[in-house]
């Protein structure tokens, strides 16, 4: 890796460590873990299953929220403090800036995933825990890359956060929407339905279906196959590359 | 002069453009090669309890009920499964429908699904299961839910060939659904007649005409003629044909 990219990545990671991100993550983890013990205590049957399921599902959402918002706020602060302007004034290609930032954020995402998965060592089988952690790291990689793209493109926190939230919700429900759209009970021949079906299928071509990532079922039912996980890794890498390229494209076209 | 917000595409280095185009093409190609998603009938899990669902609704129970309805419906729309409804666990389906109705009691969609969709499978036990579900839900709000029970009454008579069941549904509508349409409230008379209980049908029809509930002149005429036929000799040997001709 180019030393300048590595330097930017290191300082991005250092910034996360020195801000309250680790503390926030720890508090969230402990709160959700405590809530999962409470749920296990009040359940009549399948207490361990309920506990693992609740912790995994809620921690996954919390991690996505924390990682996505952290990237948005971090880059917004750079915009506001003119730190980005200083970097752009240096002999540094804009692509290096994006790659350095992205590498730092990807490392943060991976660390968040590892921390989130640690309590699962007590609640689930080791293989399932490893798969869940790896999948969460991949999911967070897409999320941080998307957040970086959003904040570079929109410049402002509110539209970037709204887009990120909307994208994530749509990606989580995309398969269900495709299923409903594919075979309606009635009105399948109507033009409006045909148009909607076409739009949904087009969206499916350019969006990841996050319902396949980081499934709680791996922890409480049976582990995923490693081939399925490697396919998710390939999809994630491809999507991160696409988002990185789109971010660079937007940054190169910006006037400061 | 105001500075332009964006620079020309030509300022973007060629490797970045190539990477963007290649990644986009790969993404589209990869997704296009993936098989279409398919759901399996046995994958339908149990819904959460109404109390949990109310909590999850975050103050929007109607919106959650609508989402759950569409979710349940998605399990019916299964590509590659020839008769999906038959493969569903009907006890579980009714649990879902109950949960949806608990969130949105005014909504008619779950009862429509029960009486018009799930009851259409060629399986008598499942048809009866759905009719029993509709009958149970009817008791909780007869004036809003009578039309679905009326459909079940017709289904019981013509498809299940169970006149007694049809009669019990028709009587429930007549007794409890005061706001139901006249045709639904009069249905029990014709079912009684078809069951051979002409005396009871005559009394009921006479009572209906005397009550003044029927005000439409054409309907009055039809029912009066019908009463005459019931009272007369050799009455209604072909009740269905007579009714069809009057309708």
Image: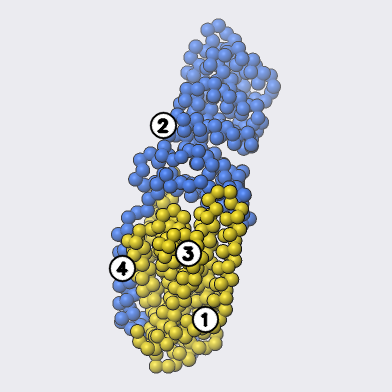
Chain colours: A yellow, B blue
Q: Are marks 1 and 4 on the same chain?
A: no
Q: CA distance from mark 1 to mark 4?
A: 35 Å
Q: Are marks 1 and 3 on the same chain?
A: yes
Q: Which residue is mark 3?
A: A121
Tag 4 residue: B26
**Dot 4, crowdedness within 10 Å: few (<14), some or many (≥20)?**
some
On the picture, is B23 further left or further right than A107? Answer: left
Counting from the top left corner in percent of width and height, residue A90 is at: 42, 93
Image quadrant assignment for residue A88:
bottom left
Q: Nearer the viewer, mark 2 or mark 3?
A: 3
Determine which residue is flagged by label 2: B122
Q: Nearer the viewer, residue B161 or A226?
A: A226
Q: Secondary structure at mark 3?
A: helix
Q: CA distance from mark 1 to mark 2?
A: 64 Å
Identify the disc placed on residue A161.
none
Tell me: residue A120, above or below residue B198. below
Q: Residue at the right extreme? A: B211
Residue at (35% x, 70% y) in the render: A238
What number of labels is visible? 4
Mark 1 highlights which residue?
Answer: A17
Q: Earlier in the sequence, mark 2 or mark 4?
A: 4
Q: Secondary structure at mark 2?
A: loop
Q: Are the residues at dot 1 and dot 2 in contact (C-beta closer than 8 Å)?
A: no
Near-viewer residue (A93 or A13):
A13
- Secondary structure of residue under mark 1: helix
Q: Residues within 10 Å of mark 2 (few under 14, many from 20)?
A: few
């Amino acid at each position: 890796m180019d030393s300048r990219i590595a330097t930017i990545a290191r300082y991005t990671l250092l910034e996360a460590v020195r801000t309250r991100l680790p503390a926030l993550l720890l508090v969230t983890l402990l709160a959700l873990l405590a809530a999962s013990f409470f749920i296990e205590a009040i359940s009549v049957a399948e207490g361990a299953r309920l506990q693992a399921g609740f912790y995994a599902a809620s921690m996954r959402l919390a991690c996505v929220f924390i990682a996505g918002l952290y990237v948005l706020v971090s880059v917004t602060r750079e915009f506001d403090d003119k730190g980005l302007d200083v970097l752009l004034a240096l002999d540094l290609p804009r692509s290096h800036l994006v790659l350095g930032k992205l590498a730092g954020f990807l490392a943060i995402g991976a660390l968040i995933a590892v921390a989130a998965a640690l309590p699962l060592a007590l609640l689930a089988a080791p293989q399932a825990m490893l798969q869940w952690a790896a999948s969460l790291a991949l999911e967070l990689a897409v999320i941080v890359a998307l957040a970086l793209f959003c904040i570079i493109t929109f410049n402002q926190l509110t539209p970037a956060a709204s887009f990120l939230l909307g994208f994530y919700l749509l990606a989580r429900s995309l398969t269900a929407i495709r299923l409903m759209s594919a075979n309606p009970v009635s009105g399948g021949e109507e033009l409006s339905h045909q148009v909607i079906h076409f739009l949904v299928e087009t969206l499916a071509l350019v969006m990841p279906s996050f319902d396949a990532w980081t499934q709680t079922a791996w922890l409480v039912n049976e582990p995923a196959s490693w081939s399925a996980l490697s396919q998710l890794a390939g999809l994630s890498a491809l999507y991160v590359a696409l988002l990185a390229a789109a971010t660079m494209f937007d940054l190169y076209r910006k006037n400061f | 002069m105001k500075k332009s917000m964006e620079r020309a595409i030509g300022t973007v280095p060629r490797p970045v453009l190539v990477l963007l185009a290649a990644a986009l093409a790969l993404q589209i190609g990869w997704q296009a090669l993936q098989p279409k998603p398919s759901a399996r009938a046995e994958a339908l899990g149990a819904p959460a309890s109404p109390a949990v669902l109310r909590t999850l609704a975050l103050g929007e129970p109607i919106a959650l009920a609508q989402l759950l309805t569409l979710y349940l419906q998605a399990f019916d729309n299964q590509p590659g499964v020839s008769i999906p409804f038959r493969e569903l666990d009907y006890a579980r389906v009714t649990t879902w429908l109950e949960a949806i109705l608990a969130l949105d009691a005014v909504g008619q969609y779950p009862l429509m699904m029960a009486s018009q969709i799930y009851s259409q499978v060629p399986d008598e036990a499942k048809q009866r299961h759905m009719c029993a579900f509709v009958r149970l839900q009817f008791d909780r709000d007869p004036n809003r839910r009578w039309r679905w029970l009326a459909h079940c009454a017709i289904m019981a008579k013509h498809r299940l060939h169970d006149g007694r069941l049809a009669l019990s549904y028709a009587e429930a509508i007549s007794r409890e659904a005061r706001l139901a349409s006249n045709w639904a409230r009069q249905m029990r008379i014709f079912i009684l007649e078809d069951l051979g209980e002409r005396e009871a049908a005559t009394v009921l029809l006479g009572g209906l005409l005397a009550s003044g509930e029927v005000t439409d002149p054409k309907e009055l005429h039809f029912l009066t003629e019908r009463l005459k036929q019931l009272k007369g000799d050799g009455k209604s040997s072909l009740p269905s044909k007579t009714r069809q001709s009057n309708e």
